[in-house]
C-alpha cells in the first residue's frame, strides 16, 4: 500500500511518534491532520510542520470524537487513513492509594480511544477505494512491564482488538495494521521512568517511523521493530524468563 498523497488523521500528533509520522507523511505528499488536547502544543506543531492541519480533540472523550468527525470529514472528505496513536504511560504502584477514577487513564485514552475512533470513522473509511487503519500498540502488548501495569493492559487489549478488527474487515477494502513500537526516545518513554530507564536507550522516532512506513508499503499487517519483535518471539518461546527480565527492569 502506497502512503503517498493520502489524507491521514493522526491522534496524539503533537509530539513523539505521532509528530514524526506527520513529518514523514507530509514529506511523501500526504495531507496530514493531527489532534491533541493542548492548544499551545497544537500551535507549536503548526509552526514546526508547515502544511499540517491541527484540531484540538480528546481521544478519551466520545463527544469530542463525534465533534472531530464532523469537522474533519466535512473539511477533508478524501480522508482515507486513520492512525490511532494517542496514549499515556504512567509508573503506577498498585498497592498505593489512588482515586478509582484516576486509575484507568491509559485505558481510556489508549484503548477506549481507538475503539471509539474506529467506530466513528469506519463508515466513512469504507467508502474510500483503499482505506487504512493503523493502531499504535507497543512491544508491551506481548510482554507486560510491571512498572506500567495499566499501560501494558491497555496495549494488550489494543493488540487483541486489532486482530479481531482485521478479521472482521477482511474483504472490505480497509486494511488494518498494528504498529508495536519498542521503547522509543519520546517524552512518554522518559516521563515517569527515569530510574527504570537509566542506562537504557530507546529507538530514534525517525528510525521507527521509517520502518513503519516501509512495512506498511510492503504489506505488513503487524510491524514490530527491533526489540518489539524479540518480545513477541520470547513471549512464545520463554514467557516466564522474559517476564522475569521485565520485573527486574521495573526495579520491583
Image: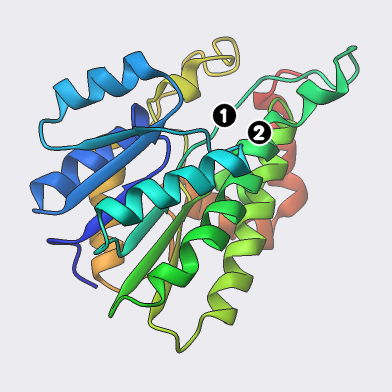
Compared with 62, 177 (above or below) is below
Q: In the rendered structure, which disc, 2 or 1, sits on the residue that comes first in sequence?
A: 1
Q: Quadrant of the C terminus?
A: top right
**Looking at this rendering, what residue extends furthest in the bottom direction?**
171
Disc number at residue 106? 2
Secondary structure, mark 2, is helix
Query: Image quadrant of residue 12?
Result: top left
Q: Position of residue 132 (x, y in %)?
A: 36, 67
Task: Count residues near mark 1 (Cα–Cα under 10 Å), then give few for <14, some for 14-19, many for 20+.
Answer: some
User: Is disc 2 in contact with disc 1, using a CB cutoff of under 8 Å?
Assistant: yes
Q: What residue is shown with label 1?
A: 88
Q: Is residue 151 visible?
A: yes
Q: Position of residue 71 (x, y in %)?
A: 36, 46
Please tell me which residue is depicted at 61% across the width and 37% down the height of the picture.
61
Please tell me which residue is depicted at 16% across the width and 23% down the height of the picture.
48
Q: Position of residue 163 (x, y in %)?
A: 59, 69
Front residue of this view, candidates 223 and 170: 170
Compared with 85, 203 (above or below) is above
Q: Is residue 144 visible?
A: no
Amino acid at each position: 500500500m502506497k502512503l503517498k498523497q493520502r489524507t491521514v488523521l493522526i491522534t496524539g500528533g503533537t509530539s513523539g511518534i505521532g509528530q514524526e509520522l506527520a513529518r514523514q507523511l507530509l514529506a511523501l505528499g500526504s495531507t496530514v491532520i493531527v489532534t491533541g488536547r493542548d492548544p499551545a502544543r497544537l500551535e507549536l506543531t503548526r509552526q514546526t510542520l508547515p502544511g499540517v492541519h491541527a484540531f484540538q480533540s480528546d481521544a478519551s472523550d466520545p463527544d469530542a470524537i463525534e465533534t472531530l468527525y464532523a469537522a474533519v470529514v466535512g473539511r477533508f472528505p478524501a480522508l482515507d487513513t486513520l492512525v490511532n496513536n494517542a496514549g499515556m504511560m504512567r509508573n503506577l504502584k498498585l498497592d498505593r492509594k489512588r482515586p478509582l477514577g484516576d486509575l484507568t487513564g491509559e485505558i481510556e485514552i489508549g484503548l477506549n480511544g481507538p475503539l471509539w475512533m474506529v467506530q466513528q470513522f469506519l463508515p466513512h473509511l469504507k467508502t474510500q477505494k483503499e482505506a487504512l487503519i493503523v493502531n499504535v500498540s507497543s512491544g508491551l502488548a506481548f510482554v507486560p512491564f510491571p512498572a506500567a501495569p495499566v499501560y501494558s493492559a491497555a496495549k494488550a487489549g489494543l493488540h487483541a482488538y486489532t486482530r479481531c478488527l482485521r478479521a472482521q474487515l477482511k474483504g472490505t477494502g480497509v486494511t488494518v495494521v498494528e504498529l508495536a513500537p519498542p521503547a522509543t526516545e519520546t517524552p512518554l518513554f522518559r516521563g515517569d521512568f527515569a530510574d527504570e530507564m537509566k542506562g537504557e536507550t530507546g529507538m530514534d522516532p525517525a528510525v521507527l517511523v521509517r520502518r513503519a512506513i516501509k512495512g506498511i508499503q510492503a504489506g505488513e499487517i503487524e510491524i514490530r521493530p527491533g526489540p518489539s519483535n524479540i518480545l513477541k518471539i520470547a513471549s512464545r518461546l520463554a514467557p516466564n524468563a522474559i517476564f522475569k527480565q521485565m520485573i527486574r527492569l521495573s526495579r520491583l
